[in-house]
Amino acid sequence: MRYDDFVPPTSRPGPRRRPVFAAVALAGVCLTSTGCGGGDGGTLPDDAEAGAARPSAPASPGTPSPKPSAPEATSPSAASTSAKPKPKPKPPARGPLTGRTVVIDPGHNPGNRDHTREINAQVAIGTGRKECDTTGTATDAGYAEALFTLDVSRRLRTLLEEEGAKVVLTQDGDRPFGPCVDERARIGNAAGADAVVSVHADGSATGNRGFHVILPAAVSAGGADTTKIVAPSRELGERIAGKFVRATGSAPSNYIGGDTGLDTRDDLGGLNLSTVPKVFIECGNMRDPQDAALLTSASWRQKAALGIAEGINSYLMR
Ligand code: ZN
């Protein structure tokens, strides 16, 4: 098995380091009384930001714009000439991934911040209960993680569809909030996905840089059972990590995973409740200026999507 430029060594199990969590909490960013561990927002620092992130209108370059409105609906004169047929949907491409199903889970939802009550409702995640969803983090300039995840996920969908895959998004900016983390897992399960990737970016301290892939721990509790997906998910995660390094030039996280770019967690409902191979990727740290410059760049996001797509392809074609 070859990972091109980067072979992630086996990540070490054991307690995760949480140096940033304390720093963030001390800085007063964590506003909850129950601690900063939130939903499936990725790492604890990310989750710590979740309740506080209220990004205003994103001002960063390369910010994905909302879905373009249909031009034919904007003027009366256009209506009279709208007899021209709508373009037919393109038939699915045929390619190496024809017959395979990939579910992409864009982390959070831009509307979550306006639905605090709904996303704070508790759901069962096997190892306990947790918020339905979280708002996610943002760059200091206000570019929301929820917009980043949607943009990368859409780019990823395009790349995978070009290879023939059937692609399902758990949300496409088409619902007011959520879905809840348990529903996100069920969508992958119901689709019979060959692989699921949940796309995120972290909210850690300045100086903490790089990406990491989160793998499901072996969990058998509360109706959750990841026994059968631990090994294939690790395979998926290692291949994504290797291709991500190659496509983006980013290094594995310098603050989580001991330079492996891999972390294993048992506190994420989206992983615990999955019955199909699934990983999360934290593409970078939105709170670090250097990482933020990458995350807000459309061309970098394309590279990120390419790296993830190539990792999925490598896993599915193995
Ligand atoms: Zn997140």
Image (tube, helix red, strand yellow):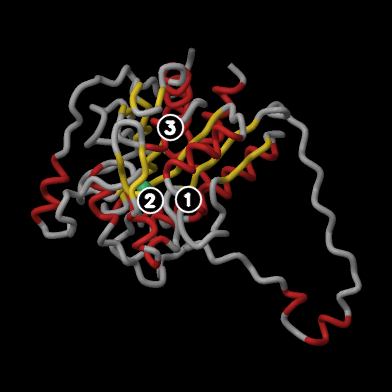
Residue furthest out toward the front: 222
Q: Which residue type carries mark 1?
A: Pro
Residue furthest out toward the bottom: 76
| Depth check, front residue: 16 or 94 | 16
Whichever of callouts 3 and 2 sits on the residue coming sooner in the sequence is: 2
> Split into 4 quadrants, where in the image is the C terminus?
top right
Q: Residue at x 59, y 26 (%)?
A: 194
**Percent x, y for residue 63?**
47, 63
How far is disc 3 from disc 1 in space, using C-alphas?
14 Å
Residue on which the image places disc 1:
179
Quarter of image, res 165: top right
Q: What element carries label 2?
A: loop
Q: Which residue is drawn at 30% across and 31% down?
A: 127
Q: In this view, does 77 lie to the left or right of 295?
A: right
**Percent x, y for residue 317?**
62, 20
How far is disc 2 from disc 1 in space, using C-alphas?
7 Å
Q: Which residue type carries mark 2?
A: Asp
Q: Residue at x 72, y 28 (%)?
A: 99
Q: Is mark 1 on a helix, strand or loop?
A: loop
